[in-house]
Image (cartoon, grey):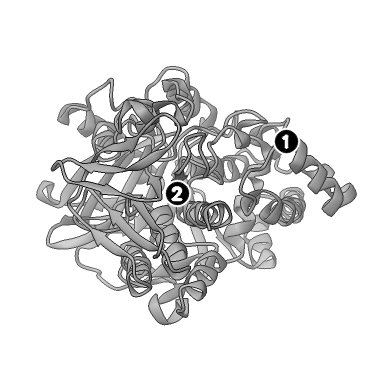
Amino acid sequence: MARRAIIIGAGAGGLACATELAAAGWQVDVFEARSEPGGKMHQRQVGGVGIDSGPTVFTMHWVFEQLFKRGGKHFDDCVALTESRRLARHAWTDSSYLDLFHDIDQSSEAIAKFSDEENVDGYQRFCKDGEIIHGLLKDNFMASARPSPAKLTYRLLRDGGMKALSVAPHKSLWQSLGRYFSDPRLRQLYGRYSTYVGSSPLLTPSTLMLIAHVERQGVWCVAGGMRALADAMANVASENGATFHYNSAVREITGDERSVRGITLASGETHNADVVIFNGDTAALSDGLLGERVRRAVPSRARKQRGLSAITWCMRASTSGLDLDHHNVFFAADYEKEFSHIFEQRGICPEPTVYVCAQDRLNGECKSPNGERLLLLINAPADGDHLAWTPEKLLEQRNRALDVIKRGRVNIEFEEENCLATSPDDWHRRFPASGGSLYGAASHGMFSIFSRASSRTKVRGLYLAGGSVHPGPGVPMATLSGTLAAREILEQVN
């Protein structure tokens, strides 16, 4: 008789785990509180169209290629991708702007015009060191189920020799960027990559340089948006035999403090299984939202340890001025103040950095010139369980964000009925116990990468997947977490 796994949550980690276990012959049931798969990969309906309201950047193609292959499918047959020739357009309130590309020479030429040859040299050194770090950490950290400082150090020295000295986690990303860039705008630009893991560049380790290398390996746009990726992942799991139960919130993980037995739904219905995989923010476990029996399965997380939240606006709008690309970032002058406001003062500075995803634009073309779909995002503290964002406060933040964009030479016009805001308290309701954090814990300090829970817990039969566990946040990493959880289960239980 096939062993049975219950997965709580149909986010990227849960979908990957479902595919892996179902392909291995397990009976897999996925219980999702919402009506569709995807977790943070979701859309909001604005002005009669769907707008991606969570992740918008698709990278690390190899993660999905390998997952779908193990599920008996060719990824490119299931998901239509178009590679973005331009990584992103970056603009500043002094009216300067810079486009970056996959090709290092093309980006070097752009930086030479934007800044000077000294910073071109710094950029090229930054790319070289980022590639080294990525090469050392891809297998030794990302694909390792339970990395430890001692084990990682040994493997880095074994595999990298003197190259391993490029990994300097005792220095912050912000400190390290000063070795490459004298132009403060370039330091801002590459410091922003820390926000991909919900962290401050002032506090996160310099190893986060590898994110820039990941983007240079390729950034794609998914036809139908990131929600289409979630649907494709769910389809592969289903075709391998996994069963999805939507609108099925889980009230409790059953069993005792030593082992799990199954789940009880909010409806009172019970289901038993050999293993339970929780694909949600681990704070929901430590806060007791899924029962006292599993409360000690993971360490608790203090509010100050949470990663970034965000305020977003989904819009149907028209734009003028500087042409947008698919990915755009608008910077104000004082980047350090922005993060001290969020992590120390628990607020948002008057001039926030604004990310704009123009979802109808790609490679210089706009598919919908009249009423294009935009997602605007500014970083915010993850205090959604303590502070409520009133309509007045959200309007104030929107005006500030639009002012930064306007000073970056882009005008956005829209009707109020075509603008939908989402705040940290909204994110907190959508992802219980998170406080609105979109990334789990912040990656602050040289040992922060080891502080995330691994896929296996100290409660027998309970496993974890998702962006709040190892190897970290983001759709590719959360997907890897599901694969790692399945690998642990197959090694221990089969």
To which residue does mark 2 refer?
A: 329
Residue at the spot x=42%, y=17% of the render?
A: 345
Q: Is residue 436 above or below residue 223?
A: above
Percent across and percent down for residue 229 are 37, 66
Outermost residue to the right: 162
Q: Please name whichever residue, 392 or 285, is drawn nearer the observer in this view of the structure.
A: 285
Residue at 67% x, 55% y: name it.
138
Q: Amino acid at mark 2?
A: Val
Q: Give percent across and percent down for residue 205.
A: 65, 35
Residue type for callout 1: Pro
Q: Which residue is mark 1?
A: 149
Q: Nearer the viewer, residue 75 or 339?
A: 75
Q: How many neighbours does mark 2 have within 10 angstroms: few (below 14), some (14-19), or many (20 or more)?
A: many
In this view, the residue in front, 482 or 42, is 482
Contact check, label 2 and label 1, Cβ < 8 Å: no
* Up/down of 79 relative to 436, above or below: below
Residue 384 sits in which quadrant? top left
432 over 377 or under it: above or below:
above
